[in-house]
Image (tube, helix red, strand yellow):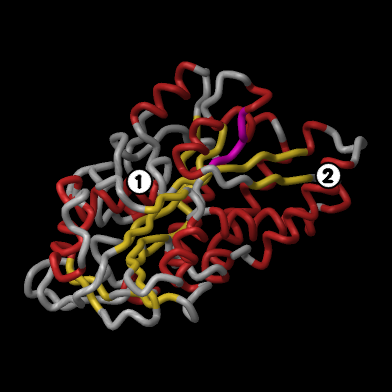
Amino acid sequence: MIFPRMAFLLCVCAMGLASAGVRAQSVVRVDGSSTVFPISEAAAEDFQIARREKRLRVTVGMSGTGGGFKKFCMADASLRVDVTGASRPISTGEMAACRAAGIRFIELPIAFDAVTIVVSKRNPLESISIEDLKKIWEPAAQAKIFNWRQVNPAFPDRALKLYGPGTDSGTFEYFTEAAVGRVKASRGDYTASEDDNVVVQGVSRDNSGLGYLGYAYYAENTDKLKALAISPAVGKPAVLPSEQSVMDGSYVPMSRPIFIYVNAEAAGKRPEVRDFVEFYLKHAGAFAREVKYVPLRDVDYAQVLENFGRLRTGTAFEGHSEIGVKVAELLKREVKE
């Protein structure tokens, strides 16, 4: 499925590429997470409409979180993107790549996402526990767990087919840490793609399928998919993903902040990059709600804008995700590059 705004962007990009008169410095290049893509897409469309007289163009790619960081940290400036979306914090390896290329970055949380566990509308299951998700997805399950009943005797006796993000995805990294207990610890015998639409199509057509993806992709396909409520621990009630459950902290451990990372030199020296990011941040709450993510608090967006205005470089993390992190806390942490 193409998000409604994507058709506009594809049209704008095609016209821009065909126009020899567009100046190179008038282009802002964005890439990265498929989870963050719907918000960046919305920001790019509205920014280009608002700044049309200035002939500014924003291109938005979708290479996955890892793929986006590769383009963001490239040594060749002609191939480098100015902004990358990320569904998890920058890793230590990516920080090293940025340092080697002389790139300083600004880390900006923009919304919350709820990693959503989905099945077909025709699947009778309504909920699942973190323990059961671990049994399904841990590396030891590969070529061994191939029936729902093997996971839990209460589950239907039918083949189990799995769909999920590829290994370049920040959603993959976050999910494996939250469900399995270790980053990138996953069985490999599943249908994988950096494009969440592949997960949507696979699960919706397969009564035996189970997958996980960003909440926006579920929300755009509620006619095809069912979200499973998640029990975070034995004896704990199962909770469905929603704005309320993310905001009140009950959808743990599958809720997480999502980010954009901005090249600090580009933001400092190129007005079009700075203008676009400021526009993005000022409207991020509205964009997040529009595409079914959970906005930050107004006070948090104000702090994000202040951090960007100061070109506050570095990351508030230690090169890995943190389960249950609060945005207000990380915005005030000391940052490292």
Q: Nearer the viewer, residue 56 or 182?
A: 182
Q: Position of residue 105 (x, y in %)?
A: 50, 32
Q: How many callouts does the rendering have? A: 2
Instruction: Determine the residue positioned at 49% across, 58% down.
Output: 198
Instruction: Look at discs 2 and 1 and give the one toward the viewer.
Output: 2
| Range of magenta residues | 80-84
Task: Indicate the secondary structure of the residue bearing disc 2.
Answer: helix
Regarding mark 1 in the picture, which secondary structure is present there?
loop
Label ID, residue 16:
2
Looking at the figure, which quarter contains the N terminus?
A: bottom right
Q: Is 241 situated above or below 23?
A: below
For the C terminus, which image quadrant?
Answer: top left
Mark 1 crowdedness (10 Å alpha carbons): few <14, some 14-19, many ≥20: few
Q: CA distance from mark 2 to mark 1?
A: 40 Å
168 lies above or below 191 = above
Q: Position of residue 72 (x, y in %)?
A: 54, 32
Residue 199 shown left or right of residue 32 in the figure = left
Q: Which mark is residue 332?
A: 1
